[in-house]
Amino acid sequence: MKIAFVAPALPKAGAVAVGVMDGGKLAASAAQLDRATKGALTRAIKGSRFKGRPRQMLEILAPAGIGNSRVLLVGLGKPKDIKDLDVEAIGGSVVERLSRSGERGVTVMVDAIPGIAVPAPAYAARCGLGARLRAYRFDRYRTKEKPEDKPSLEKVTVMVANPAAARRAFADMDQVAEGVFLTRNLVSEPANIIYPKTLAAEAKKLTKLGVKVQVLGVAEMRRLGMGALLGVGQGSAQESQLLVMQWSGGARGKGKAAQPLAFVGKGVTFDTGGISIKPAGGMEDMKWDMGGSGVVIGLMRALAGRKAKVNVVGVCGLVENMPSSTAQRPGDIVTSMSGQTIEVINTDAEGRLVLADALWYTQEKFKPRAIVDLATLTGAIIVALGHEYAGLFSNDDKLADKLFAAGKTVGEGVWRLPMGEAYDKAINSDAADMKNVGNRAGGSITAAQFLERFVKKGTPWAHLDIAGVTWSSKDSPTVPKGGTGFGVRLLDRLVADNFER
């Protein structure tokens, strides 16, 4: 989807979208069109249930008096209530409405409306971002789709006073959108296409943007003592990998500002459950069990794309969890890179084993100022929070608060759950330092407690369980169903608001 910003002028052809406020009050551009059509817009509103409420829409086809093929009236609601996310939703809703209309382009006319907290150039940029995010489509394997079933809309032109300011505001947003799309693509690919080696290869493409990428193989990880990660992948014909990405856009030297911020992702490219095999129903969804690594790769794309003034490292443990004669068994005891031993009670609780070694490696190698890990870790988090929020666990209140605020700003909500000694005791083992699962109670919490045992004292750490938000079975204004890319915008905002110099 191409997004353009131009100065205001009544478009002479094609589709045009204009705003209508709560109660049916026309914005300036809409009023101008109403006069040109001798009241066609006003008559259409009076003859419908359209009231200008948020994201209500009303189409008027080929009104007399103008050369436009259609006018789309877009409900804005009350000006004082309009925030950034509402504007993004407007852009996305326009694209969704006209996507298969036969229109190839639409002009969205942005007016300076008294009472709106979002300045017109920022409004235009947010509208363009919403349009881009909603236009995403993963269709590379559809070979017999009829032309009439394919989206026709190719371009959104946003008319606004001071289009240059809108372009500047949109530039960084566009790079973040590219990071979201990369994550959505990776999560959507089937497991015969994306497996540890090929996922690492996709990340290597970020070198073109200045990201330093290193990939460790099995032999190197074995020398480092990564028995937890390697145990998960030993049943697969696909070799496990440790992906390490570095973006150095911040301060140099040895001060705190030069310490990198670290993001660690679970990259189980397909999860059968291993010997503790999952039921067949729905197992195809386990292609996106690498969602945490997908977010970290997409985030690195976003930060490098917008030249973020921060030092960041992204580390992803990439494995495939398969049952075979070489797969680890329930009851096996593995030794992690930290030296701690783990009794594997359930081979389907594999993501935490991968993260255990990835977290320890990240701290040993980079000594980060803070760590955030992401994983499609537990089904229990979906029971607790549904598909609306990611679960947040942390040893640091300030970091947790920053994540909550960032999520609220971009519409990627996180909800903090408790941790504590009583939960931690549930993963004590009689045979090793710990076991990889507790009982059925508080499954997401005991998984977080497991991860905390691999976080060094004094290191601010947060864990995001994104199992419920990585994939969606329904559309939203800026997220079509499928891979959501949830987490890229959240973490980019965390960085921008708190860690850039």
Image: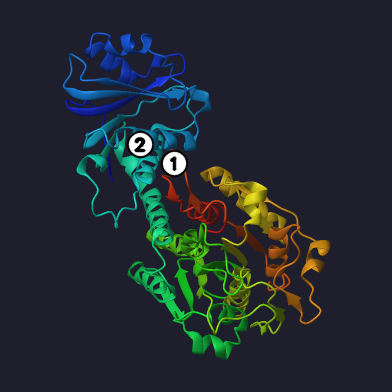
Q: Position of residue 169 (x, y in %)?
A: 38, 44
Query: Does 44 sit left or right of 312 as displayed?
Result: left
Q: Nearer the viewer, residue 167 or 177?
A: 177
Q: CA distance from mark 1 to mark 2?
A: 10 Å
First in residue order: circle 1 vs circle 2: 2
Query: Does 243 sit left or right of 427 as displayed?
Result: left
Q: Position of residue 63 (x, y in %)?
A: 21, 16
* Residue located at (32% from left, 19% from top): 30
Residue 344 location, quadrant: bottom right
Q: Name which residue type carries label 1.
A: Asp
Classify mark 1: helix, strand or loop. loop
Dot 1: few (<14), some (14–19), or many (≥20) neighbours within 10 Å? few
Looking at the image, residue 395 lies above or below residue 454? above
- View extreme (front): residue: 280
Q: Position of residue 453 (x, y in %)?
A: 72, 72
Q: Badge 1 is on which residue?
A: 475
Q: Name which residue type carries label 2.
A: Glu
Contact check, label 1 and label 2, Cβ < 8 Å: yes
Looking at the image, residue 26 lies above or below residue 488? above
* Residue located at (40% from left, 35% from top): 123
Looking at the image, residue 139 lies above or below residue 296? above
Q: Nearer the viewer, residue 90 or 427?
A: 427
Q: Position of residue 381 (x, y in %)?
A: 64, 54
Residue 293 is labelled as: none
Dot 2: few (<14), some (14–19), or many (≥20) neighbours within 10 Å? many
Q: Is residue 251 visible?
A: no
Residue 96 is labelled as: 2
Residue 61 location, quadrant: top left
Classify mark 2: helix, strand or loop. helix
